[in-house]
Image (cartoon, rainbow, N blue to C red):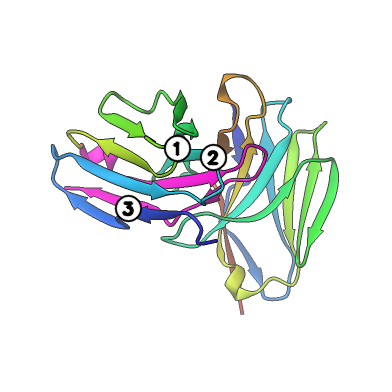
Amino acid sequence: QKEVEQNSGPLSVPEGAIASLNCTYSDRGSQSFFWYRQYSGKSPELIMSIYSNGDKEDGRFTAQLNKASQYVSLLIRDSQPSDSATYLCAVKADRGSTLGRLYFGRGTQLTVWP
Amino acid sequence: DTGVSQNPRHKITKRGQNVTFRCDPISEHNRLYWYRQTLGQGPEFLTYFQNEAQLEKSRLLSDRFSAERPKGSFSTLEIQRTEQGDSAMYLCASSSPVDTQYFGPGTRLTVL
């Protein structure tokens, strides 16, 4: 059973601060990693994908991947109240009989207060 | 590109009834996935299709659940003899073989 663990929330930061969201995964062979944002009552919305070790930046969002440590993170710079949501870490099964499915963590609830 | 669509968006049913949900994927995507999400949890995989072939089913998918994708386009998920434990958000996602998965708005099922 592939496990995806996210830092327990909720996480609360002031507007303008950096929010840091963390995720670890159990399958060392995983190659594809995703961060989804989910507003209350809505479906997950893709924010970032990352496949290689290092950092990947997209606007205020930076995803970081360390395959040796089986660790992936998401940094949100200049946090805004509109960033308040649950952030889901997902790892894609890249091989074997489960090829293609996503394994999700439980999510970290982020609140950005004005 | 109209995105992934799902119908109905909400369904309330009584225990023991059958329900059917529909998912229309992004038109050029040949892979279609079903997930289920309960409150406070991440989505859990149920099943997926490549074109019309159902390639994998989770152990979560009991024999009361069946999914089809008859012509490799839209898909349906049927739950027979619903139970209160089936209450959840049912999410559909689609992708091309090497692309990321994009989710539809979901169908929220409430079983009374």
Mark 3, Cα crowd under 10 Å, few <14 / some 14-19 / many 20+, is many
Is there CB contact under 8 Å for labels 1 and 2?
yes
On the question of residue B112 being in view, the answer is yes
Looking at the image, is mark 3 or mark 2 earlier in the sequence? 2
* Residue visible at 14% across and 40% down in the picture: B17
Give B1 or A5, whichever is nearer the viewer: B1
| Discs 3 and 2 lie in a common subunit | yes
Q: Which residue is mark 1?
A: B72
| Tag 3: amino acid | Arg
| Tag 1: amino acid | Gly
Q: Which of the numbered marks, if any, corresponds to residue B30?
A: 2
Q: Which residue is mark 3?
A: B108
| Tag 2: amino acid | Asn
Please say if A32 is above or below A81.
above
The answer to whether residue A69 is left or right of residue A100 is: right
Q: Quadrant of residue B97?
A: top right
Viewer-side label of 3, 2: 2
The answer to whether residue B89 is left or right of residue B50 is: left
Dot 3 falls on which chain?
B
Please say if A75 is above or below A50.
below
Task: Where is residue B22? Give x, y as percent.
Answer: 33, 47
- In the image, the segment drawn in magenta is B83-112
Q: Quadrant of residue B85?
A: top left
The answer to whether residue B83 is left or right of residue A49 is: left
Image quarter hosting the C terminus of chain A? bottom right
Query: Which residue, as the protein is rendered here, is positioned at the far top?
Result: A96
Task: Where is residue A58? Give x, y as percent.
Answer: 77, 62
